[in-house]
Amino acid sequence: MKQHWLERPGTIRLLLIIFLCILALTLLANLLTEVHGWLGLDGTFAFNAWYGFATCIGMILAAKLIGRFLHRKDSYYDRD
Amino acid sequence: MTGISAIPPGLPLILGALLLPLFGQRIRAVLVLGLPLVALALVWQVPDGVSLKTGFLEYELAPVSGDRLSRLFGTVFAIMAFAAGLFALNRTRLVELVAGLICAGSAIGVTFAGDLLTMVAFWEVLALASTLVVWSAMTDQSRRAGMRYLIIHLLGGVVLMIGVIGHIADTGSVMFTAMKPDSLAHWLILAGFLVNAGAPPLSAWLADAYPEASPSGMVFLSAFTTKTAVYVLLRGFPGAEILIFLGLYMVFYGIVYALLENDMRRILAYSIVNQVGFMLCGIGIGTEMALNGAAAHAFTHIIYKALLLMSAGSVLYMTGKRKCTDLGGLFRSMPLTMICGVIGALSISAFPLTSGFISKSMISEAAANEYLTAVWLLLAAGSAGVFLHAGVKFPWFVFFQKDSGLRPPDPPLNMRMAMVLFAFLCIALGVWPEPLYAILPFPTDYVPYTRAHVVAMLQLLLFSGLAFFIMLPQMKRTLTITLDWDWFYRWLGPRVVSQAMHVLSRWHAHKRIDFLRHVGTLFGTLFLYHGPQGILARTWATGSMVLWVVILLGIYLVAYYY
């Protein structure tokens, strides 16, 4: 089967580089934008970047933890 | 109070939907697409204030009463009915089309109800019609899920009705105005509203019932029930602080459950709860900007959520599969469905230049303006989490991820047109928000596109995306479901009852016989009076009942005129 251009390792590496560049650009934009923190914490450098990253890791780990207790086979209720 | 402005805007949808079975395919298509447009036109004929009054018992009802808020919701409900009708036009069961349009009509009916009794009447029609939409998938699962859905919503309806009766007894007024949760009656009304909003502890009905509907059925369902609840909360309980806490719970409940979920449409169902959580927060904050934000977010949410469900529905329609573990790599053969799904995913994540950005940011900014630091921080984390579970997870696992080997084409033309229409609206509202801002409940000069705001949102979302891909090994899908509050009535309840029966059956025989004799006597007495031949329940011919009703109505009519 012909490989789709999006699947080629070269394309994927290129996309990854572009993504990382965009991430860097948003951090750079932070330097050029006047940030006025209203609530204290949001005045720290690149607040939204580190906060978004950290809370997402936190939410995924929390979900994993909750899943450990609440996960059941997807046929769980079918037995009734 | 006469003329076109006195026609309840939802009525043509409900009556027209009931006529659908009389016509052939072509006229039916015209009606399905035309009726929502008629409703939309009527929505904009309703002026501010009461435009239709009618008497009921000793109360004066206002079945048609308009203001900016009702026109806003009426507009988006009508647009939604049009697009969902278009999406559902091919091969959908007739009963689903009829029920779907009745859902839309009754939701519009609620938004223009000036009094509580009219509101409750349309509210119940909405519950029945949406149950029919679930059932019209005609599977065993949909039959059972629909029954659970119906029980929960009838329960909510009863709680609401008790509250309404209490409110009328307390105040003597049936008018639907802003209330505060300060009396038992008002708490009950609030609880009835919250059942439909998917608030805890009864949030599980949403992810339980909606994904069992057909591909087009879930598109209909996603819009009306929960957003009608948002509307009545906006009108009935603006500024009720408890809504902030409930809303925040729903935001994170939606994220965590969606992250754990494997079924693509259940992911999107959990994300409805998550999004309604944002709206509840806005209503709870209660400032003009927060209420505007909640209303605007309901408007944009209906459109992008329908788009996401059309995209997921197309995948289900073409492949028959709904689990992430079975899907993947569909971008090759379903490019349009993928692009529309990604636009929906970006919109729900509030990416700049999409509709979510111009609405959700109003709620966060309202929280910041009130110096609600914790709320603001949690909403920001919630926004990041939306990108995680709906913005990246849904398109990634369905369209990319691995090659599932499936090569279905894009869906039929009408489904593609519905998706393109809503994808266009998502971008159009994001680029050009002014028309939406102009019809919000309160005048606003809010400017969403400031440099600081765009940079902040891009950072938040893109770094969330980074977190997703770093944590990808942790996100591997498994064939699991996650227990929810519905465990109590789906698992524990039936077992408690069967255990009780078991204990009862082992009871000492003589005591049991004694007990059963008493029960038998009781039922015998009841049967004597209420049985088929009983004096209190003698069967009356339906014809004579109808005759008496006709006579009574005739007398009423004559008496009314003279």
Image (cartoon, rainbow, N blue to C red):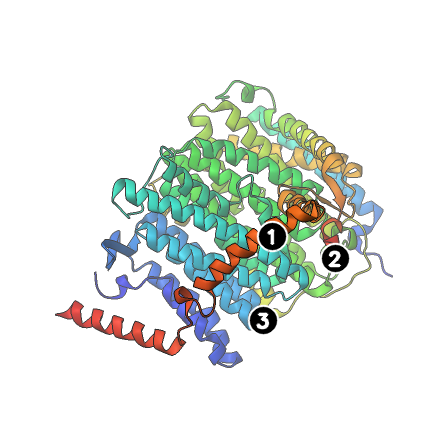
Q: Who comes first in sequence, dot 2 or dot 1? A: 2
Name the spot of residue B83 as percent of width and height, x first.
51, 62
Q: Who comes first in sequence, dot 3 or dot 2? A: 3
Residue bearing the label numbered 1: B516
Side (left or right) of A28 relative to B359? right
Identify the chain of the residue marked 3, using the numbered disc in the image: B
Q: The disc labelled 3 sits on which kind of residue? A: Arg
Residue bearing the label numbered 3: B93
Q: Secondary structure at mark 2?
A: loop
Label 3: how many residues lie within 10 Å, few (<14), some (14-19) or many (20+)?
A: some
Side (left or right) of B56 relative to B233? left
Identify the chain of the residue marked 1, using the numbered disc in the image: B
Name the spot of residue B454 as percent of width and height, x first.
54, 35
Q: Residue lying furthest top in this view?
A: A40
Residue at the location (37% across, 65% down)? Answer: B11
Residue bearing the label numbered 2: B330
Residue at the location (48% across, 58% down)? Answer: B525
Residue at the location (48% across, 70% down)? Answer: B32
CB contact under 8 Å: marks 1 and 3: no
| Closer to the eye: label 3 or 2 | 3
Q: Which mark is residue B77?
A: none
Does B452 sit above or below residue B124? above
Q: The disc labelled 1 sits on which kind of residue? A: Leu
Name the spot of residue B486 as percent of width and height, x first.
62, 45
Q: Secondary structure at mark 1?
A: helix
